[in-house]
Amino acid sequence: MSDTAAKAPRWAIWLPLALFAGFFVLVMFGLLRPASHDVQSAMIGKPLPPFNLAPASADRPGLARTDFAGKPRLMNVFASWCVPCAAETPVLAELAKRGVEIDGIAIRDRPQDLALFLARNGNPYARIGADNVREVQLAIGSSGVPESFVIDGKGTIRYQHIGEIRPDQIDMILGKLAEAAK
Amino acid sequence: MIAELGLAALWLAAALAVLQLVAGALALTPRGAGMAGVVRPVAMVQGVLALIAFAALILLFCQTDLSVKLVAMNSHSAKPFIYKLAGTWGNHEGSMLLWVTVMGLAGGFVALVERRLPEPTMLATLAGQAFVSIGFYVFLLFASNPFERLPQPVVEGQGLNPLLQDIGLAFHPPTLYLGYVGLSIAFSFAIGALVTREVGPAFARAMRPWVMGAWIFLTVGITAGSYWAYYELGWGGWWFWDPVENASLMPWLAATALLHSASVLAARNALRAWTVMLGVVAFSMSMVGTFLVRSGILTSVHAFAVDPKRGSFILALLAINIGGALILFALRAATVTEGERFTVTSRESALVFNNVMLSGALGIVLMGTLYPLLAEAFGAKVSVGPPYFNPMTALFALPMLVVMAIGPLLNWRRDRFARVRARLIVPALLAGAVLLWLGLSSGIGLLPLLGLGLAAGLVPASLMPLRGRNLRRTPLPVWGMVVAHLGVAVALFGMACDSAYTVERLVAVRIGDKTEVGPLTVTLKSIEPVAGPNWTALEGEMLAAYLGGEPVALRPQARSFWAPPQQTSESALLTRWNGQLYAVLGEQAQDGRWQLRLWWKPFVTMIWLGGLMIALGGVIALIGRVVSDLRRLIARDKIAYRRERQGR
């Protein structure tokens, strides 16, 4: 008495294709939309916690909370064992050339590895603190490497950048630093 | 050297896939019939080459060859061996290579053993399989080459996401992939049958074991994934309606519908166009799921590898494969002749109802998964969660489960409800009694209440098809169906119990404090630091006593991994026959007290036991089908042999 599929009206046969076309349009829109993947850090606007890290490298001093006074600085959380960190070094060098003062926090690193990393990729850092137990990293709300923080002259976190800074983001970082100087 | 070898094998496999497509397509034309003999061997060699490429990548990961970019990005020399191995597929490139490997192997295996289909349909099927494979080969070779070398080797690798460093998860992706990609065979069969217009019982019988095999892996993969999320994420839930989970559920729903409609087509030559469409839809859902996970278009708790460029590439593949298949379907389905007829009260009708409900549930899940994207198109950010999914899927699942109790008892083609009424009395009474008793006595929610009542009725109802049968002579597929349906009842019971009777306690305690959670008394004995191969952790030792009985020790951990740095909480479980205690160690408060999160979950393990039973039912049915196919083949050979001897 009832037979299903074959009795369906002719247009029903095109229905799956129409639904798929709708899906395609929706997803295309989703892919093309400008990415708003910026993670709003909970630490922005908060002062750095007190810390005092021993030097990680023989030729640079360590890093302490009290070093952040005067001009805004870029604080880069990195490690010699991290590939994106190595990829980021030319960008950091470019920033340093443009007068940005960069401090580093080396996460769980060994002195010999770090020395090799700096020798190979250049050393844009004014100071490098050794964070061997990730105490500072966790305290400033950083969960991975590399991450960079714009710290203003009062020691307040003004911007958190997750992942490596890409060449096309140099101007954005300079803008954040200029903003922090106001 | 190994990396270059793997890359070479991959290129060769891709080239053979092109040959397989061209030869298969040419062989369907009158002038190219000579090409027909090439297609099957090419399909087999292509599968083997893809396997060689995958084996090369496994070897690179096992040796931690840090000159290979993928290894440097995803592995670490200090990682335990088993996770180095699992690192092979714990990343985008490796998992895509696994994808084409499974596609190639599945195609090769079909070419090797499948003899039931008419040869033209077989050639079209293998050409279709090659067509889909080519897209993924191109994607691998041009947009995500797993064998790319670094300009200079790095000193140390970056490590694998710590959440993924778990023995259960190490083998979860390959299992799911065997299921996902195994469905490509159903897709290609559907394409082949549409091209040659050979949609009939032979097509359904040939396709069924392949769908069944993929469906078993999918079922096991989803069950294992659910258990992993349950104990590893530390949230105490077993299903989160996360896009990644939905991505695996949608192909499963489609494949389940396909299995049932294929059995109608195989037995009764009805539901032709519908079965073919489900064949297309099932693998399309696999591809859509992969796309949603890989493109990062939806925010998910476990989006591990996201890159919008890759997203565009996979989307293009989707458009070509799914769009093409659906156009072919629309053009050809009208010419697929009408199948056999049947009355409303018949097994066919019950299975049609099952199909409609499963498809409805599939639509609900797909809509809920995509809705955030749709809302974003109109400028709103929303997330769709359990308040939508639970009642909406229940709307389809509950009526379907009622019919699941009745359908297997009905005859094909025409039946009377009065005939099976006697067999349904016991289940109906049991369900009614449980509903009445729980509904009046305790204040549990509507859905858990309906779930418990239905589960109570389903257990006897799913055993009913065995009543009056000689159990030794009952065919294996019937046993498989009974076990799988019983598994559904068991899983439903676990789900309903978990949501109705779970007790949760969030407490801050000092060492030595006692906490009551459900029937258990938990005492925190100590907190000690411990170290693992690539992590350090704080480990709490607690003693849990069930109703004042002998205490058992539990050791939940808060772990810190250092490559890459990340913290995870390792929950501790105490499993009893009637439930599980689930303990998570939280942070230490200012005053020195420790946060503990404790759950008592009655019968929660039934969820995964039920899932495994469903898969086991599939295995039993598959063995039954393969054995009877082999018997038929042997009998046919014997007859042919006799005829030959008589002919002499």
Image: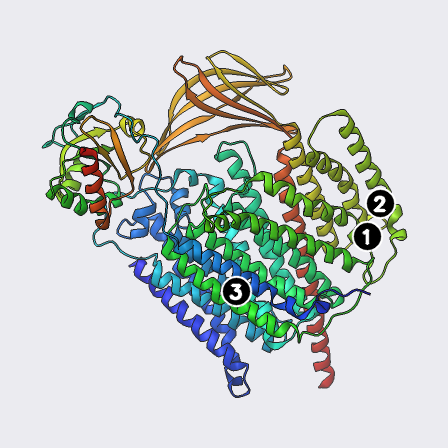
Residue occupying the point 35% across, 60% down: B143
Dot 1 and dot 2 residues touching (CB under 8 Å): yes
Q: Nearer the viewer, residue B25 or B79?
A: B25
- Please name the amino acid that badge 1 sits on: Leu
The label number, if any, that marks residue B236 in the structure image: none
Mark 3 crowdedness (10 Å alpha carbons): few <14, some 14-19, many ≥20: many
Residue B149: % across, % down = 27, 56
Mark 1 crowdedness (10 Å alpha carbons): few <14, some 14-19, many ≥20: many
- Please name the amino acid that badge 3 sits on: Ile
Q: Which residue is mark 2?
A: B424
Q: Which residue is mark 3?
A: B322
Of the numbered discs 1 and 2, the one sitting upstream in the chain is: 1
**How far is the residue under mark 1 from the one under mark 3?**
37 Å
Q: Nearer the viewer, residue B435 or B635?
A: B435
Residue occupying the point 36% across, 49% down: A35
Residue occupying the point 48% across, 67% down: B320
Q: Looking at the picture, do discs 1 and 3 lie on one chain?
A: yes
| Residue B55 visible somewhere in the drawing | no
